[in-house]
Amino acid sequence: MNALATARQRRARVLAAAGALLGVGFVLGPTIGATDLDLAAVWAAPFAWDENPAAAIFFMARLPRVLLAAIVGASLALAGATYQSLLRNPLASPYTLGITAGASLMTFLVIRFVPAGGLAEFTVPAAALVGALLTTLLVMALATRRGGTPPAVLLLAGVTLNFTIGAAVLLVQYFADYTATARMVRWMMGDLEGATYRLLAIQLVASAPAWMVLLRRGRMFNLMSLGLDEAQAHGVDAARETRTGLLWASWLTGVAVAVAGPVGFVGILVPHAVRLLGGVDYRVVLPGALVGGAGFLVLCDLLSRWLLRPVELPVGILTACLGGPFFLILLLRREVGRG
């Protein structure tokens, strides 16, 4: 009972901090950008968009973008926490297993062979989602042929496949024309432009079931983080839970990448920040990553619109600038710990 009470206290502390981060993002995000908005002017005539440009910008451009950033950030952070639990590796992410590379390859094939406009609006996101799921299935198939689904085997299969798919991505880029190459490079940067309420609804409907499935697996992830033998001794079907977790995490990654491109390092940064604040209990880490990831990407998108204004920096560049040094620090700390 004391352990349960402690977990609840840590969850409340983590959620309060993550919620405060998200709240700041929601308050500042719709008002700051290439043109700052006065909330008094927005709410003076909130629905008279023809006569009130501030309200039109707020409701039609800024607010959908902030909401989309929250959904994408929540999905990527929760997926990252899931990968790190199942693979028992704090550096695991969608990039580790080649999930993002698979989404990129399918997207580049569509950009290369499907004319811009028309159905391309729908085929590019669909291709990214299909690529992420196919890569996950291929990684699990390769790992099974190599002796089951131990974390080390999954990691080895994922890293190997990541390099192979990466080579195919470069090959598609090499044979593309300049216009298609520019679209590919722009997509790889990750961006949240073009957010609409219809896109938000699709994203939420596609993501919410995966959120619910993974958030309920905190106790099982705790057991699996101790080792497959320990988990099986407590009645957990480790192989089934690994497959289920990987598929749902890859679904979240594919849905997020489909609309925002490969926004990197969210799945590494946020779960580790949650662990520093609330410990390694996945009953705390999973909900903390969900809320913290939403707030983190909202604030990153805000900074990407503010730092070089009126020019907007793609949010994927900013997360990479933050995540790269963090990744190296984390790696060096692990090496020092071993020493």
Image: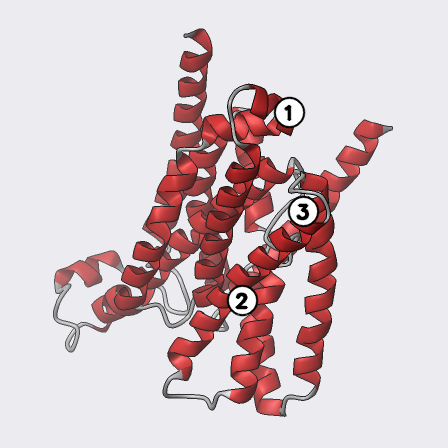
Real-space Cα separation, disc 3 to disc 2, in angstroms: 18 Å
Label 1 or label 2, whichever comes before in sequence order: 2
Give the structural element (helix, strand or loop) at label 1.
helix
Describe residue 163's horizontal placement relative to residue 17 as left or right: right
Tag 1–tag 2 contact (CB < 8 Å): no
Q: Residue at 33%, 59% (x, y): give it.
A: 30
Dot placed on the residue nearer the N-terminal end, 1 or 3: 3
Q: Residue at x 61, y 84 (%)?
A: 181
Q: Residue at x 57, y 80 (%)?
A: 109
Question: What x and y, as percent, mark residue 292?
Answer: 45, 41
Q: CA distance from mark 1 to mark 3?
A: 17 Å
Q: Nearer the viewer, residue 274 or 50?
A: 274
Label 1 belongs to which residue? 229
Q: Is residue 63 left or right of residue 100?
A: left
Q: Dot 1: few (<14), some (14–19), or many (≥20) neighbours within 10 Å?
A: few
Q: Residues within 10 Å of mark 2 (few under 14, many from 20)?
A: many
Q: In terms of depth relative to the viewer, which is nearer, 239 or 1?
A: 239
Tell me whether the residue at label 1 lies in contact with that at label 3, contact meaning CB atoms closer than 8 angstroms: no
Q: State the image coordinates of residue 105 (x, y, percent, origin top left).
A: 60, 72
- Which of the 4 image quarters holds residue 125? bottom left
CA separation, marks 1 and 2?
A: 32 Å
Q: Amino acid at mark 2?
A: Gly
| Mark 3 lies on residue | 154
The picture places residue 149, in percent across and down from the top left corner, at: 64, 42
At 47% from the left and 25% from the top, the residue drawn is 219
Q: Which mark is residue 131?
A: 2
Quadrant position of residue 44 = bottom left
Which quadrant, please, contains the N terminus? top left
Tell me where residue 231 appears, x and y as whole percent: 57, 25
Figure disc tally: 3
